[in-house]
């Protein structure tokens, strides 16, 4: 195999992202990626620090991508409308990028400042979406965890075929998010 022209870190990470979306993170190896790119495995070391370096870059790439999609979805929206848009963006990301989505669900490595910063940005966006509900600091963390749990739980059941009843899943998802919003509104009143 010859060296592929135009190969750089971004193209390597993007190819790895496509690979994990198509085949799963378990199938990711430098050999498999090199095969997909039409290069020899050692060529990849010019662009990533081995498999651990590639996985690190994939996490950052995926978090950036998810953050961009969420920000785009919530522009001009507030309160319940913003929460629904955020939840829909998360769910859509899981559909179109299942491998990358799973990478975004990990807690950041406490020793990795770049990963910590990206995770913090994502949490800040969710905090801003929840800000109109004027939750106490601890309640805001509970709400963030709750929203993420609702969305991820639904996604997991959906992906694994856990919804067999003939009721529209879209309706169920929005019903669930609407109930979450109603609980925030009642908490805000109390």
Image (cartoon, rainbow, N blue to C red):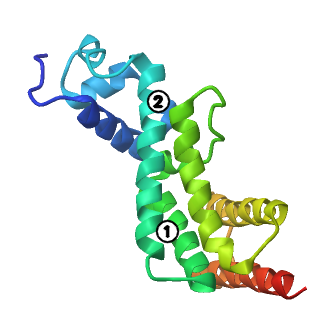
The foreground one among 141 and 27 is 141
Residue 64, x across and y down, in percent: 43, 49
Q: Is residue 142 above or below residue 86?
A: above
Quarter the N terminus occupies: top left
Q: What is the spatial separation of the Cα atoms under label 2 and label 1, in whole angstroms?
A: 23 Å
Q: Is residue 186 above or below residue 51?
A: below
Residue 105, x across and y down, in percent: 61, 47
The residue under label 1 is: 89
Residue 69, x across and y down, in percent: 42, 63
- Quarter of the figure with residue 2: top left
The residue under label 2 is: 55
Residue at 47% x, 29% y is 55
For label 1, count other residues whose C-alpha is less than 10 Å away and answer few (under 14), some (14-19) or many (20+). many
Residue 156's tag is none
Position of 88 with respect to 165 (left or right) is left
For label 2, count other residues whose C-alpha is less than 10 Å away and answer few (under 14), some (14-19) or many (20+). many
**Mark found first going from the N terminus, 2 or 1:** 2
């Amino acid at each position: 195999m010859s060296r592929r022209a135009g190969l750089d870190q971004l193209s390597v990470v993007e190819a790895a992202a496509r690979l994990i979306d198509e085949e799963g993170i378990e199938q990711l190896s430098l050999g498999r990626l090199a095969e997909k790119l039409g290069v020899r495995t050692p060529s990849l070391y010019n662009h990533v620090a081995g498999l651990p370096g590639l996985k690190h870059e994939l996490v950052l790439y995926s978090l950036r991508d998810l953050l961009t999609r969420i920000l785009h979805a919530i522009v001009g929206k507030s309160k319940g409308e913003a929460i629904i848009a955020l939840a829909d963006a998360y769910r859509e990301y899981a559909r179109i990028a299942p491998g990358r989505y799973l990478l975004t669900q990990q807690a950041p490595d406490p020793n990795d400042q770049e990963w910590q910063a990206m995770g913090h940005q994502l949490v800040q966006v969710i905090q801003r979406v929840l800000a109109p509900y004027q939750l106490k600091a601890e309640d805001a963390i509970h709400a963030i965890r709750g929203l993420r749990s609702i969305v991820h739980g639904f996604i997991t059941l959906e992906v694994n075929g856990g919804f067999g009843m003939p009721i529209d899943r879209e309706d169920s998802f929005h019903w669930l998010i609407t109930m979450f919003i109603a609980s925030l509104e009642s908490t805000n009143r109390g």
